């Protein structure tokens, strides 16, 4: 009986050790963990939303943040008074980027006519994680983000559309607002810069380099460095926005 108890005890200790090693290994080799740095502000793009009835545009500011710990880019905008955060994984961004490339190619070749106007998912689609709320991210859900184009009045220009229908929230209650963001070819080019994984990785590499800086600087001047630090403070790129870790040649203005 004593030998059996010792054997069971040893087996339990072995299982605990295996689980511990597995957890450590998973954390260490998580492909989405790029660096242990705070959420970074990537900047803003002045896009638009499409009015449902008139099919005309309303200016909308899109704010972008990036979480190096989860490799998630979050896009924030307001629609009908509600805050919306769209979380884009690397896989989501790849679909997004491919859709933009196809849109820009067909725009250059003047193929964006009435035939496929407002055809749902014409350039592709991808399931995403989204949060929304009047004042904060009170609810969350997983809608499907669609990429298409629409000929917008009054000039009939073909805008790239990022759309999603309403979806149920995990918490129940109010559904998510429907999304219909419009981007011109020029804004799509700006979007590519913010979504490209190579650029995000460079941002993390620069943060790591800054973190590891150790040796004294040659020609250091205290007064000069104070001015530099004030400039850095005034243009700080660190963001306080939180992100859920589970989870073309032509340039024309928006009318």
Image (cartoon, rainbow, N blue to C red):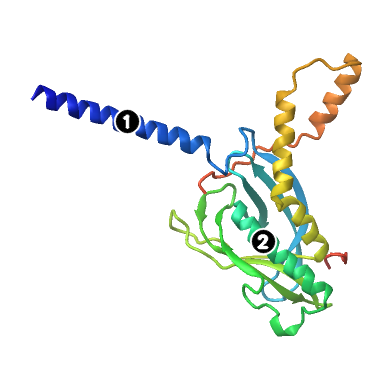
Q: Where is residue 42 shown, x and y percent of the image?
A: 73, 45
Say whether residue 78 is left or right of residue 130: right
| Disc 2 residue crowd, few under 14, some 14–19, many 20+, Cα 10 Å | many
Which residue occupies 68% across, 76% down? 53
Q: Are marks 1 and 2 in contact (CB under 8 Å)?
A: no
Q: Is residue 81 visible?
A: no
Where does label 2 land, which residue?
Answer: 96
Which residue occupies 83% across, 65% down? 254
Pointer 1 or 2: first along the chain: 1
Quadrant of image for the C terminus: bottom right
| Disc 1 residue crowd, few under 14, some 14–19, many 20+, Cα 10 Å | few
Q: Residue furthest left?
A: 1
Q: Where is residue 243 shown, x and y percent of the image?
A: 58, 44
Where does label 1 land, which residue?
Answer: 16
Foreground disc of the pair 1, 2:
1
Q: Where is residue 85 shown, x and y percent of the image?
A: 61, 52
Give the vertical position of 83 relative to 242 (above or below). below
Say whether residue 219 is left or right of residue 204: right
| Local SS, label 1 | helix
Quarter occupied by residue 236: top right
Give the vertical position of 94 relative to 159 (above or below). above
Q: Where is residue 66 shown, x and y percent of the image?
A: 66, 44
Give the vertical position of 221 relative to 61 (above or below). above
Q: Is residue 44 visible?
A: yes
Say whether residue 228 is left or right of residue 121: right
Spatial separation of the CA atoms under disc 1 and disc 2: 42 Å
Which residue occupies 88% across, 16% down? 218
Which residue occupies 50% across, 36% down? 27
Quadrant of image for the N terminus: top left
């Amino acid at each position: 009986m004593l030998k059996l108890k010792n054997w069971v005890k040893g087996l339990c200790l072995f299982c605990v050790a295996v689980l511990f090693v597995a957890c450590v290994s998973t954390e260490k080799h998580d492909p989405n963990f790029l660096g242990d740095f705070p959420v970074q502000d990537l900047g803003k793009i002045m896009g638009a939303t499409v009015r449902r009835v008139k099919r005309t545009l309303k200016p909308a500011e899109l704010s972008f943040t990036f979480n190096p710990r989860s490799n998630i880019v979050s896009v924030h905008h307001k629609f009908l008074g509600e805050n919306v955060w769209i979380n884009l994984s690397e896989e989501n961004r790849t679909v997004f980027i491919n859709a933009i490339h196809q849109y820009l190619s067909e725009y250059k070749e003047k193929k964006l006519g009435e035939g496929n106007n407002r055809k749902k998912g014409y350039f592709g689609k991808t399931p995403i994680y989204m949060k929304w709320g009047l004042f904060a991210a009170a609810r969350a859900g997983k809608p499907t983000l669609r990429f298409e184009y629409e000929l917008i009045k009054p000039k009939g220009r073909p805008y790239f559309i990022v759309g999603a229908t309403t979806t149920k929230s995990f918490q129940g209650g109010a559904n998510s607002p429907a999304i219909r963001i419009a981007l011109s070819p020029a804004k799509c080019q700006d979007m590519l810069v913010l979504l490209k994984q190579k650029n995000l990785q460079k941002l993390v590499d620069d943060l790591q380099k800054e973190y590891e800086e150790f040796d004294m600087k040659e020609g250091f001047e205290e007064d000069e460095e104070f001015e530099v630090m004030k400039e850095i403070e005034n243009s700080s790129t660190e963001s306080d926005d939180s992100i859920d870790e589970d989870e073309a040649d032509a340039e024309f203005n928006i009318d």
